[in-house]
Amino acid sequence: MLNANPVTEDMIRDMAREARSGIRHIFLHWTGGHYGHNEEAYHICIDRDGTVYLNCKSFLSFKAHTWMHNTGAIGIALLCGCDAHCWAPAGKDASLLDVAYENDHLARTDCAVIDYGEEPPTRKQIEVMAKIVALLCRELCLPLAEDTVMTHCEIAFVDGYGPGDGDPDMRWDLWFLPEPNTLGGALYPGGLLLRAKAQYYLDTAEEGKTHPGYLLRRYGSLPASGPGY
């Protein structure tokens, strides 16, 4: 069941501060399921409209979200991706691909092709995920870098079960994501996109001397709680 009570930025901020000494990574996923179907395997889930669900009382709680990397890690997932599929070009190292397309008629032979199915990641989900990453990194004092904040696809490439690796339990969560500013219908590498967006929110908050929680309330779906934000 989905959480009946709203998740506030204060809840996420306070939990992050309490877990500060024990978190080394944030892993970004999708559930591969339906909109509206919360998954307890992740600390935080984000629905199609940006609604946030919290599945733990502590970010130090063990959740089985990323093979071999669950200790000291927070798992965040988008509720989406049912019946999604991907194709990597033959003879190419899929981990080095930097362009993909949703339509195989538009794709070059050296690009990946993505079918998001009927329940793709929404722009709202992507933005809220980036804002939560910014909030967590700030409160955890965790560097926002490619070795600390990773998509499941990125860590799957490292551990040998990403696209093209031939593993029957292959994972490609957030390998590529839609970005309105790309040309010709091309998709953008998910990890790069989410980290860039999260860095933007961190930078904007610091320049305006405003906590990232302000951005979550203004542009995301988390309700305000507490004075000064």
Image (cartoon, rainbow, N blue to C red):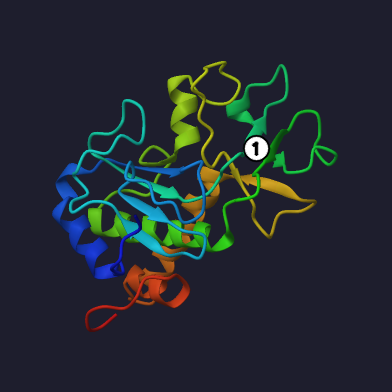
Picture coordinates of residue 132, whole percent (x, y) = 37, 59
Task: Name the residue nearer the viewer: 6 or 104.
Answer: 6
* Disc 1 target residue: 98
**Residue at the spot 26% in from the left edge and 61% down from the top edge:** 12
**Residue at the spot 64% in from the left edge and 35% down from the top edge:** 85
Quadrant the N terminus occupies: bottom left
Quadrant the C terminus occupies: bottom left
> From this viewpoint, which residue is outermost toward the bottom?
227
Picture coordinates of residue 108, whole percent (x, y) = 81, 34
Identify whether 214 is placed above or below 125: below
For residue 31, side relative to residue 122 (left or right): left
For residue 126, side relative to residue 25 (left or right): right
Task: Name the residue nearer the viewer: 152 or 56.
Answer: 56
> From this viewpoint, which residue is outermost toward the right?
105
**Residue at the spot 78% in from the left edge and 42% down from the top edge:** 103
Picture coordinates of residue 35, whole percent (x, y) = 51, 54
